[in-house]
Amino acid sequence: MREITYRDALREALSEEMQKDETVFLLGEDIGRCWEGAFKVTKGLAEKFGDERVRDTPISESAIVGAAVGAAITGMHPIVEIMFGDLTTLAMDQIANQAAKIRYMFGGQVEVPLVVRTPFGGGVNIAAHHSQSLEAWFMHIPGLLVALPSTPYDAKGLLKTAIRGGDPVMFCEHKLLYPIKGLIPDEDYTVPFGVAEVRSEGKDVTIFATSFMIHKALEAARMLKKEGVSVEVMDPRTLVPLDKAKLISSVQKTGRLVIVSEGCKTAGVTAEIAAVVAEEAIDYLDAPIKRVAEPDTPIPFSPPLERYVLPNEKRIIKAVREII
């Protein structure tokens, strides 16, 4: 096992899959030799694989994803980097109406093996146009897979699975995760989609959290343990497909559920997970479901206001205490 950063884990996945399969190539703004990616995930890849396979593109998200969709349906395996997740809005027609629907519209005759990597999330003081968490939008589109790795191990393993698959994947990376370190094996491995991971075992309450919020939830669990509260922290790893069986099993064990997501509360990830449990596991609940999410507001530029709206350990602990 080696300890590396989330950023390096992603880079290793890209490099190893490009080495293995010549149809895999990268495209995006400033990912090549000059800047090597806004968050340096593609550092060194242009030198290793050349400018044909690590393609700097014009500043047009719609054109980038459109070109990638075309490449995918003709046998290539493109990996798009959208500099900030907020800017996927500029390519929503290509993502939601083309990539997601082509296999269905052609009766399964055409695959779209496309990966769209993009950083979501706040906490770095870059205001409302660069700090959103929009993964719930992509959950709503049939045909798209949605991955949210929270550790270096999952970042590498899930990205390899995404690249090797035949479906379009929205690969959501939180900005604050890039420097986080974790252990990964030396040998090749993948992480399957649709298999959740229990990050911490507990018996009193389940906390279902996504992406960077996993680390907030784990810290809250450690603090609650001092009060005698046993918390089970569940990481879905992918939202589409969702591991409903493991979620329901955890709720059955604890009888209580707190859902934590950095996206807006209304019609967000927390709402969908709450609905799943209400429909399929309500008889196991001994208390109301609690949701911890961002209020329905743009992310402020002001650092104190940004800290105020983003979910944190204190809000998670408060939600747990209310149902214990």
Image (cartoon, rainbow, N blue to C red):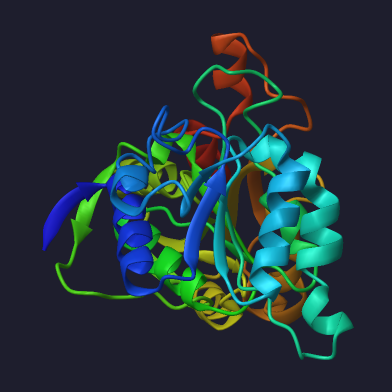
Side of 192 where 134 appears, left or right: right
Q: In this picture, is 145 found above or below 65?
A: below
Question: Viewer-proximal residue, 178 or 244?
Answer: 178
Q: In this picture, is 153 found above or below 38?
A: below
What is the count of numbered marks? 0
Q: Quadrant of residue 40?
A: top left
Side of 238 where 177 appears, left or right: left
x and y percentages locating residue 279 in the rendered image? 77, 77
Q: Quadrant of residue 176?
A: top left
Question: Viewer-proximal residue, 126 or 322?
Answer: 126
Inspect this view and state whether residue 320 appears.
Answer: no
Outermost residue, left side: 1
- Residue visible at 29% across and 56% down in the picture: 12
Q: Quadrant of the N terminus?
A: bottom left
- Residue visible at 62% across and 75% down in the picture: 241
x and y percentages locating residue 215 in the rendered image? 38, 45
Q: In this picture, is 242 found above or below 299?
A: below
